[in-house]
Amino acid sequence: MRFVDEFRDADKAHALAARIAALCEPGRQYKLMEVCGGHTHTIYKHGLEDYLPESITLVHGPGCPVCVIPMGRVDDAIHLASQPDVIMTSFGDMMRVPGSNGAFFDANARGTTIKMVYSPLDSLKIAKANPDKRVVFMAIGFETTAPSTAMTVLRARAQGVTNFSVFCNHVTIIPAIKAILDSPDLRLDGFIGPGHVSTVIGCRPYEFIARSYGKPVVVAGFEPLDILQSIYMLMLQLHEGRSEVENQYSRVVPWDGNPVALRAIGETMELRPFFEWRGLGFISHSALKMRGAYADFDAELLFDVPGVRVADPKACQCGEVLKGVLKPWECKVFGTACTPETPIGTCMVSPEGACAAYYNYGRLNRQRVPEAISIELSRP
Amino acid sequence: MTNQRVLRADREQQVLDRIERARRRRPKLREERITMSHGAGGKATQTLIEAIFLDAFRNPLLEPLEDAARLPIKGNGEAGGGVTVALTTDSFVVSPLFFPGGNIGDLAVNGTVNDLAVAGATPLYLSAGFILEEGFPVADLTAIAASMRAAADAAGVALVTGDTKVVERGKADGCYINTAGVGAVPAGVNLGVAQARPGDKVLVSGPIGDHGVTIMLARGELDIEADVESDTASLAGLVAGLLAAVPGVRALRDATRGGVATILNEIAKAADAGVLVVEDAIPVRPQVRGAAELLGIDPMYVACEGRLVAVVDGAQAEQALAALRAHPLGAQAAIIGEVTAQPVGLVSLKTTFGGTRIVDLLVGDPLPRIC
């Protein structure tokens, strides 16, 4: 398949792996954080860690939009969906995120209508097709998905759709990275920057990481070779004693981002004073809500939202995992009480979550897997 | 490796062992109500079956949980002897009812025929039960019945009994069909995934994921078009050819709900062995791969309706491959992996990229990722 296979070439991977290994200084340990859950997914899905030397550890960061939604917001969403004549729409991987009384799937079993959509525009379609219903879009995600929510709201206003609203849970990546950098129990050497977020915000917002914290950042694409190359670029910076923001994903990410998308966000949304992140607690100016001028599309104003605050389960160590202090398997409940079937923490829900990725793909003692098996690739 | 690393690896292994023990415990159904995940063919479905149905119905004929039950019928009179009969049943609720490559009627016949065929049985007779919604067009029902007849003729089976119920508008989605089937198991044939052993090879009979991707696209919710159609077909002829040519076939499964990944997990679990497959060796049509890539799902978990997974004595794998390829439905068959002694109960995959990862059961339907 063009534009995919080129980025999964094992020969190129071996060559890059050799160059990465050559940059490792003996006795030194390297901890690199991939901020984005999409990267975590790619790393595990393709078995990328097999290419890395022992001295490089990848730490899975907070950039999984589903994983950082606190339980209270899930409860609020289910409360919204339980109101008369409401159809709620949501991205697929939100459907299994547990609130204090089950996830969206369980709510549907009790009678709500929460539909899976691929795009907020599909929600608008549903609203237009069901004028007697009130359609609420469960908006989640970083700057990656916020523009599509914003564009949908702009379109709804332009088309005079009055039965569509947004339950806004959009979050912003920079405050989360800053919270992690300021966390005392953490030692990172560099960041694999989030690719999709950067298509919107560009690379400039990361400059403080390189300048003030002295950590290199390489914005990376999502194919396995992209990530391997980014690791090489990070290791080269560390080797040469540089800390800069570099753009590996230049085929998609413009240095200054996407001004049209940023304008759409700015037009319809504004920063909240603070927002709760699962596992990380309250972070100021880290999330978006609808602007006053778009109040008629703000589900939080149109409906009576209880604003539930639910403490994370005691046993759950999602916060430590999100900050990279613990590896997924080091969490007390990992794989026994907390599994993809019965997730306690959100890291176990989305395939982008560090725990789910490790449980689904990485839970493997590599010494027990036969090195090679003799299968001739005899395609007819 | 430094001492510290060895220690960490040991600690990780302890966690992995503990997880493996937890996975072997009898599953408990925690939900108070049925959710869509319980019908998706993954872990939630297995838990439902084991916690409710197996628990209530438990008997030695049910317990293997194979695609069809094998029933020894004692001979009567002086002839004596006795035969083994295979019995299976399956319900069809596909939406849309008509899709590229077939409709619910073909599917209902082929699905049950295939469950018999992969049990090693010669499919003989089928029943058909219809649940129809008030207002359902008769022309559609006529078309569905005609496809069922054609599929039955192609598979060499007869539809010999049936039932019809009509429910009020809104209580069903047009037309649901249940079929049951019986077949005769030839003497000496005893297939089952528990018989897989290290060194056996794993084969698939053709490109995977066609049916599931076709249905997802036919629902028209995704605005993606691809030149792909359902692979719904009777596997009876393909299986007969394979069993005649290769004595060392241990187990066959048709990869329906849950896809090939789910079958591989069933093999690993039942055989107390590992299964290692090679991503590059698994046939997937480019248009299916493309659609799956766009939708963020893995073809390994996508349903097929005319593909089987075979576990074959390693020494006879080439013979089996040739036998499959000799049949039109198996023209693109491939050896995709083998049964290994370790790691017990796990399916691992050598990725095209050159890494190794687990292929686990899904909890429910594959959920698309948001970005």
Image: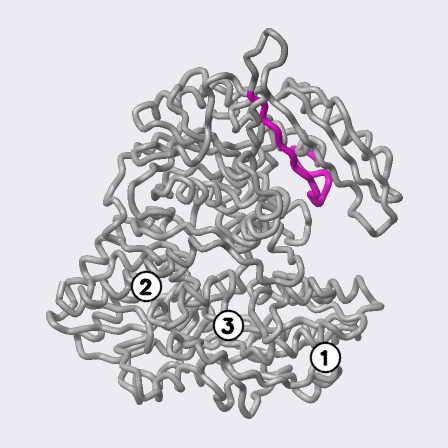
The mark nearer the N terminus, 1 or 3, is 3
Frontmost residue, B78 versus A364: B78
Q: Chain of mark 2?
A: B
Look at discs 1 and 3 and give the one toward the viewer.
3
Look at discs 2 and 1 and give the one toward the viewer.
2
Mark 1 element type: helix
Image disc number at residue B184: none
State the extent of the magenta-drawn residues as a range: B84-103
Residue B117 on image: x %, y %: 55, 25
Mark 3 element type: loop
Left or right: B249 with respect to A139? left
Q: Chain of mark 3?
A: A
Query: Is B85 colored magenta in this rendering?
Result: yes
Image disc number at residue A65: 3
Q: Which residue is mark 1?
A: A297
Say what amino acid the circle numbered 3 marks. Pro
Q: Which residue is mark 2?
A: B15
Residue A355 on image: x %, y %: 41, 66
The quadrant in which the C terminus of chain A is found is top left
